[in-house]
Amino acid sequence: MENPFNRPPIDVSARQVDGRVPCWRKDYLAAVSATKDEKGRLLESLRTGEDPTIRDGVNLALSRLLDPEGPRDPLGKTAFLVHDGTGTGKSFQAILAAKAIAAETGEPAFLTTRADLIPALRRDLDRLGLDDSGITFVAIEQLGPFLKDVQKQKQQFSVAIVDEAQDCRIPEVRKLLDRIPASRQLFFSATPFNNIDEFCYFSSKLTGKPIHQIKTEITSANDLQFAVADQLKQIISAGGMVHREFPFYGNVGPAKLLPFSAESRSAETQLIDGYARLVENRSFAQQRQLRDDLTIELNTASDATKVDTILQRTTALLSQNRKVILAGDDLPVASRILKDADGLPKETPGFLSALRLALASHGIESSFIQAVPQSSDSIPALAKERAAVAARNFAEMARFVDGAYRTDETGRRVELRGLNNQPLYAPSQTKVILIPYQQVAGWPELNQRFPKAPEVSIILAPTASADQFIQAVGRGSRRNSQGPTDVHLFANGSCADRRRMSALLKGLQFIGATGSPALAPFLQLASDCLERTSAQRATQDQRLIQLQKNQHARSARIFEPARYRVN
């Protein structure tokens, strides 16, 4: 198998339009120079095209954004989308595009992403030997308060840049982004299109067509995949986006189907029936909350059945001198329906927390990434808590990363480099890291590769989000090793896993319509897993029906009405 690190990423855009992609007209990146000479080697390599992916992405974006004839959305904004896969340098492109367009226009660039990812962008800025002059960093969670101040000061920006732009799926985020005083928008995401609504949003931004017109064209087509591909060809040919990515480098085996006991199925039935009773005569908002709570309970209960098997697989992989990434959800539950023997609500720990305890009981040290508080992205008062979680996560991530580092006088972690400015190798402190799907977009420290580093295996529990699934696999395969990555998926025949796999498959199929070559093995994996879990469940249902019939037959023999007749 060819190692994709030995060559540039596949240009998916060029494939879709038979190579007839627009070229950049001016090297805007040439105007960006390092302010710290000792760190200028990396920036110089990017400017001169040693890795053309980043240079071309910046110049293509600015060629479009600075084109006075470029199409504008209904708000009069020009937009460009960098739809590059994980590990292709989107954060470098975002920073360099900000610096280049600020130098070109004389106005500062605005750069936003989730709060926990801002520190990673600032570290990349430092790695390039650049300062933050000409760039305003603001977390998406703080856009509301920031915009109030901007309006008072009547400040104007050259461009609004959004890293991890899949967050635009949230309507409130889209509204805030459109209020930023900038006539240009630049989006970066490995997974911008997860459904028709998201696709239509970005397509409208990039073509200037109304969203309803694009949605009508797609939904009225006989072939959804053809309609999406045709829209993308139009956008690419007009210079509105670029898409490059590495193919997946590794092995994807069949999903491991775990047994789902009769006790677990009984509890699942109790939960569903119990919540059905709670839903009766409730308001719509209460019903929706109860359905969300039921989904969480079912998912947590289903994942609890996987802990022992995944622990055994992790131990086996460690014995083979591999590093292990464990991805799943970590939502603890105190059941509304199920009770313990003492009559108190049955408590089930989060999946990753349970795995962490199981690993510790076997003497295996691990790094643990914590999910940020739910809904805290819309609550400014929780910004400090999010920042504290991000700081702990960075420290935990650092323990899993291979490489030699020191802490400088400001407390920052600095990579040590040797001859030819190459990073020095040192083994990591931990060989296992547990990451919730909610945080999989924040793995910046895994983008370093050493020939001496152990190979990596990724173990996944089911998730309904195609975006988070691909982020987990993509970032995991762009990790600090030059060997192939093994992917293992563990599922069972529960209602929860079948629903999650069904939603995942639909999402992957839509992403697949965009021509992504890295998706093929995971489409097959999700399809096979859903088919096998459904078949497994159907077989279990037939056994249960037969068992009930047998019980009814025995009951009929035991109770004979004729024996109790009065003559």
Image: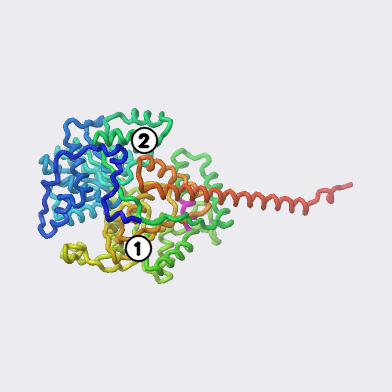
Look at mark 1 in the image and give the residue it sits on: 455
531 displayed left or right of 162: right
**Secondary structure of the magenta portion, mostly?**
helix
Q: Quadrant of residue 39?
A: bottom left
Whether the magenta-drawn stretch holds residue 301 is answered as yes
Which residues lie in the magenta part? 296-304
Q: Position of residue 257 (x, y in %)?
A: 51, 56
Colour treatment of the image: rainbow
Label 1: element kind: loop
Q: Nearer the viewer, residue 533 or 343?
A: 533
Whether the magenta-drawn stretch holds residue 522 is answered as no
Residue 35 appears in the picture as rendered: yes
Q: Residue at x 45, y 42 (%)?
A: 288
263 displayed left or right of 76: right
Q: Quadrant of the N terminus?
A: bottom left
Label count reads: 2
Q: Residue at x 20, y 54 (%)?
A: 124
Q: Nearer the viewer, residue 75 or 207?
A: 207
Look at mark 2 in the image and give the residue it sits on: 228
Q: Amino acid at mark 2?
A: Val
